[in-house]
Each structure stands twice: as C-alpha cells, then as structure tokens.
Image (cartoon, coloured by chain):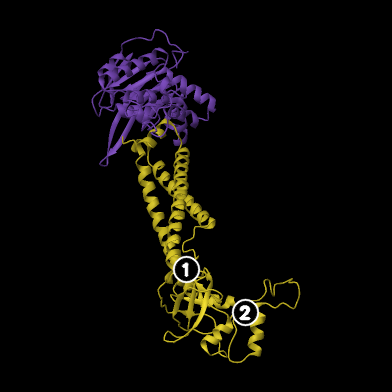
Chain colours: A purple, B yellow
C-alpha cells in the first residue's frame, strides 16, 4: 500500500450556510490529508464545525469552495447520484444512533449495502457472516435489532459500514449512545479495526475515544487549531 | 290433538282470497302445497290434513292433505310480501271459490331454448312470439314475456343498486384518502432510517422501490383479510335474513369478481400511496431526514 498517497485530501475547504439571510461559515479554509491506516479523531466544542467537516468528507454535503479528493476523486464536483454511489462503495458510515432496519436481521442489515452494490447473494452472506464474526456477533446473525443491546447494535452498524470494503470509515460520535463499559468495547473494536488496516475518521466528544486515536485534530470556529499525531503509523495490515 | 290454527292466507293463481286453515289428522285426501313460511308459522308439515275454505266465516270447507311445502324463489321482489301462499289444483280452486270462469292471471311456460337460433324445429315458439300470438287472438287481457315483467319489477332494485354503488364509490374515495394519510404517516416514522440508508449510499430508486413494495404487500394482505372478513360477514347476513324471510335469496354476495376488483383496487391504492410517500421522503435531503 502506498502510504504517501493520502486516502483523503482537502484543500482550503469552505462551507457556508445562510442563517437569517446572512452567510455563516461553518468550515473556513480547512486543509487536511488522511493517509491509509490512520485513525483521526476530530474534537472540539459544539458548533466548531466538526460535524460539517464530517459531512463534507463523507460526500454527504458539498463544499462552498475548495477541493476535496477521496481516493483521488474530486467529491465536490459529483452530482447527487454520483455522490450516492461513491458513498456506497467508497465510504463507510457509523452514526451515533445506529439506524439499523428494525425488520431485518443483523446479517440482512449488513448485507443491505452489498445488495445495493449488486454483489452476488453467496458473497453477501459470506461477507456478512465474516464481518459479524469479526465484531463479535457471529452467533447473533439472525437476531433483529430489538433483540440486541445498544453496543451490539453499534457493532452491527460497524459491520454494515465495512460491508463494501470502503477506503475510509467515518464515525460520528460512535460512543455517544453507549454506556461507559460498552463505549470502551467500541473503542477497542475501532482500535482493532485500525490495527487491521482500516482508515478511520471519527468526530467525537468522548475523550477516551480521542485518546485511543493515532491522530487528534482540534477544531475551533471552523478551522483546525491543533493537529497531533499520538501514535505514528508503524505498519498497515490488510483492511478488514 | 292439535289445536285449531287460523291464518289469513293469500292464494296466488286465479284469484286472491283468504281462507281459515284447520289442522286435523287425515289420510286419502286431495293434496295442496303450502308456502314454507306458512308451514313454519302454522306449524304445518307434509302429511298434515287441514280444512280449507274460501272465507274465514264459511261454515264448511274441503279437507285436504298437505302434499308439499314449497320454498319461494330467490327473487328480491318476493321479500317484502308478507302474505302466505297455498297452491292447489285448478278445478279444486274453481270449486272452492265458486267462480270457475274468472281468472286474474296465469303463467305459460315455453319449452327450454324455444325460439333460440338453431332450435330443433320451427314449430317451437319463443316467449316473445307466444305473447304476441296470445295478444293477437285474445281480447280483454294481455300477455307479457317473463323477462319484460322482471325488468319492470326490478326497476326499484336498479335504483337501490345505483345507490349502493354510490355508497361504494364514496367509501373507496374516503378509504383511499385515509390509506394515503396512514401510509404517509407510517413512512414518515421511518425518515431517520431512510435518511441513514441514503447516507450509506442507497439510491432514491431503491428507497422508492422498497417503500412501494412494502405498501403493495400490505395492501395485498389487507385486501385478503378484507375479502375474508367480507365473506364471513356475508355468510352471517345471509344466514340471518334467509331465516327471517324463509327464502333462499342471497342478500350479500362476495363473488370472485368482487374479490378481484377489491384486490386490484387495493393494490393500486397501495402502489400509488407508497409511491407518493416514498417521493416525499427521497425529495428531502438525507441530512434533514436524520435530523441534522
């Protein structure tokens, strides 16, 4: 894997919203590179622009100006259909609330993005089982979300995010809905994922989660005010 | 020994008259046929003997035996008629009334397939030609084909039928609006999940297809349950009113055609309401759907 080529490269990224008729910049000229195998935690006070940044990095929102390349593709110029397709295959999302389909089993939830990507059924089933086993739910593949605890549901959500082997895993407050013990288990899972080669960007208020990340970016008023590498990349394994 | 039972009876056939019915034991008498409704009301059965007279005040009458109990035909116009009916041989009727040369109305049954194209011979006439022939040769009365009489007597039912149809249409329109509102509400409850799926990369088309498929399946299931409920309700209605009116007439019908129309309509409504609800969802930005 080429470590010099970033998975994600943002240059002078800006995002402004109209609030009461006046433009307000949530992200102001932000530049950032994320390399394969990194685990970046974006922290900062509420309203500092970290969620807006995550939306931009995930091709959910478009920057007002600037350039954003993910795996060499300019996300800013994609139309809605292209961005949707790109999100499906290129980016994995983990939300604060798990957003699992209540009528589907854990395995079916994991298979959902693969079905959308037109993967063969046998491949989907094998991949879902592999991922659920990886996150420690190999014995609960047939359980529906209401039969799972919050931590287990979040594990299913992580497995779902990894289904199409994305280049980048984005997580928005992944421990926000979990108790302390389950949150620690989730941090351990993210750590294992990263050690196994998954590139992760998380937005969090959770100090423990931020401490576990390799790199911590502090934001304030739409700009990066601090960027610390806590653990350098020693080696990168094959992503899960 | 059975008690005397007096009933006012109406005779169909030559004349309309009333007669007291006396219930006694007896064999070897001439037979009459009575209406099932009269049989039930008077507690009469086949084999019972009764004394039969033209007037309730008549000092004597003829002893007859009940040879048959007839059931009224499945004709809606018969339902409202509350009179009892007795059938007897023509000569017996003439002697009973004492007016053998007078007749109010009578029916002529033509042969089956008479007058139909390709019938066996030209000697068999159809109802229209029979009535035309009678009207041409007779004076003082008029013959009508049964179909013409049926059309005339069913005019009221056609009005009632239109009224029912209007109620049905209003019900369908109201149900469609109700179904649409319910679908919109139920789909809206899932806006967060749908928003998350859109963020995960599921296309608008996939969301629309999924919602429409679910709405269609629910509509199919609902129409199946509705048809089952309708059939059960229809069976109860028929059982009750057939008993009340002593008639084989079916008051409520759930035919395969009705079921087919109901399922088609339900499916159509499900697809349309699912489509509209899904469109409402996919036109909203995913971030807005998840509440961010």
Q: Which residue is mark 2?
A: B108
Q: Quadrant of residue A46?
A: top left
Question: Tag 2: Cα neighbours inside 10 Å, few (<14), some, or many (≥20)?
Answer: few
List the single residue furthest toward the left: A45
Task: Return the x and y of residue B291 as percentages of the image width and height.
Answer: 31, 36
Chain of the residue under label 2:
B
* Depicted A131 relative to depicted A77: above or below: above
Cα separation, mark 1 vs mark 2, equals 30 Å
Which quarter of the rendered picture does the N terminus of chain B lie within?
bottom left
Give the side of residue B121 with respect to residue B203, left or right: right
* Depicted B181 relative to depicted B165: above or below: above
Q: Secondary structure at mark 1?
A: helix
Q: Nearer the viewer, residue B111 or A212?
A: B111
Which quarter of the rendered picture does the C terminus of chain B lie within?
top left
Question: Tag 1: Cα neighbours inside 10 Å, few (<14), some, or many (≥20)?
Answer: few
Give the side of residue A162 with respect to residue A214, left or right: right
Residue A7 visible, this angle:
no
Residue A51 visible, this angle:
yes
List the single residue furthest toward the top: A234
Q: Which mark is residue B161?
A: 1
Q: Residue at 31% across / 11% down in the picture?
A: A230
Task: Return the x and y of residue A127 as percentages of the image width and height.
Answer: 48, 22
Q: Earlier in the sequence, mark 1 or mark 2?
A: 2
* Number of marks: 2
Task: Return the x and y of residue B238 as percentages of the image width and height.
Answer: 45, 61
Are the residues flagged by discs 1 and 2 from a single subunit?
Answer: yes
Q: Secondary structure at mark 2?
A: loop
Q: Which mark is residue A103?
A: none
């Amino acid at each position: 894997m080429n470590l010099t080529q970033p998975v994600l490269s943002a240059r002078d990224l800006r995002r402004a919203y109209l609030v009461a008729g006046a433009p307000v910049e949530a992200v102001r000229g932000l530049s950032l590179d994320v390399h394969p195998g990194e685990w970046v935690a974006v922290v900062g006070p509420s309203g500092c622009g970290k969620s807006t940044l995550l939306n931009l990095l995930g091709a959910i929102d478009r920057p007002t100006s600037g350039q954003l390349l993910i795996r060499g593709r300019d996300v800013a110029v994609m139309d809605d259909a292209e961005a949707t397709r790109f999100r499906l295959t290129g980016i994995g999302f983990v939300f604060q609330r798990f957003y699992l389909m209540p009528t589907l089993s854990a395995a079916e939830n994991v298979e959902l993005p693969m079905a959308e990507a037109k993967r063969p059924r046998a491949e989907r089933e094998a991949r879902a089982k592999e991922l659920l086993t990886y996150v420690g739910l190999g014995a609960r593949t047939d359980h529906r979300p209401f039969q799972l605890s919050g931590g287990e549901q979040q594990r299913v959500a992580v497995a779902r995010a990894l289904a199409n082997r994305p280049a980048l895993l984005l997580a928005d407050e992944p421990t926000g809905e979990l108790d302390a013990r389950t949150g620690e288990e989730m941090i351990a899972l993210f750590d294992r994922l990263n050690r196994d080669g998954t590139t992760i960007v998380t937005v969090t208020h959770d100090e423990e989660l931020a401490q576990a990340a390799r790199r911590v970016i502090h934001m304030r008023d739409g700009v990066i005010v601090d960027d610390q590498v806590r653990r350098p990349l020693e080696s990168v394994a094959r992503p899960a | 020994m059975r008690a005397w039972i007096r009933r006012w009876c109406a005779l169909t056939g030559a004349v309309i008259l009333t007669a007291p019915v006396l219930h006694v034991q007896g064999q070897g008498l001439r037979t009459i046929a009575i209406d099932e409704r009269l049989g039930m009301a008077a507690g009469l059965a086949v084999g019972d003997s009764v004394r039969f007279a033209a007037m309730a005040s008549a000092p004597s009458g003829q002893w007859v035996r009940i040879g048959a109990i007839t059931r009224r035909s499945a004709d809606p116009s018969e339902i409202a008629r509350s009179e009892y009916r007795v059938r007897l041989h023509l000569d017996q009727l003439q002697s009973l009334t004492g007016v053998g040369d007078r007749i109010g109305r009578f029916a002529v049954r033509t042969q089956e397939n008479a007058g139909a194209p390709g019938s066996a011979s030209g000697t068999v006439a159809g109802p229209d030609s029979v009535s035309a022939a009678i009207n041409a040769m007779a004076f003082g009365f008029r013959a009508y084909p049964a179909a013409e009489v049926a059309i005339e007597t069913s005019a009221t039912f056609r009005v009632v039928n239109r009224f029912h149809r209007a109620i049905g249409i209003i019900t369908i329109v109201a149900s469609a609006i109700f179904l649409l509102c319910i679908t919109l509400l139920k789909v809206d409850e899932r806006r967060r999940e749908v928003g998350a799926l859109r963020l995960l990369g599921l296309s608008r088309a996939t969301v629309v297809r999924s919602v429409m498929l679910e709405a269609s399946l629910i509509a199919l299931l609902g129409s199946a349950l509705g048809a089952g409920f309708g059939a059960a309700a229809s069976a109860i209605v028929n059982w009750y009113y057939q008993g009340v009116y002593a008639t084989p007439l079916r008051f409520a019908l759930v035919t395969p055609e009705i079921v087919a129309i109901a399922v088609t309509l339900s499916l159509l409504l499900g697809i349309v309401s699912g489509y509209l609800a899904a469109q409402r969802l996919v036109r909203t930005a995913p971030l807005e759907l998840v509440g961010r």
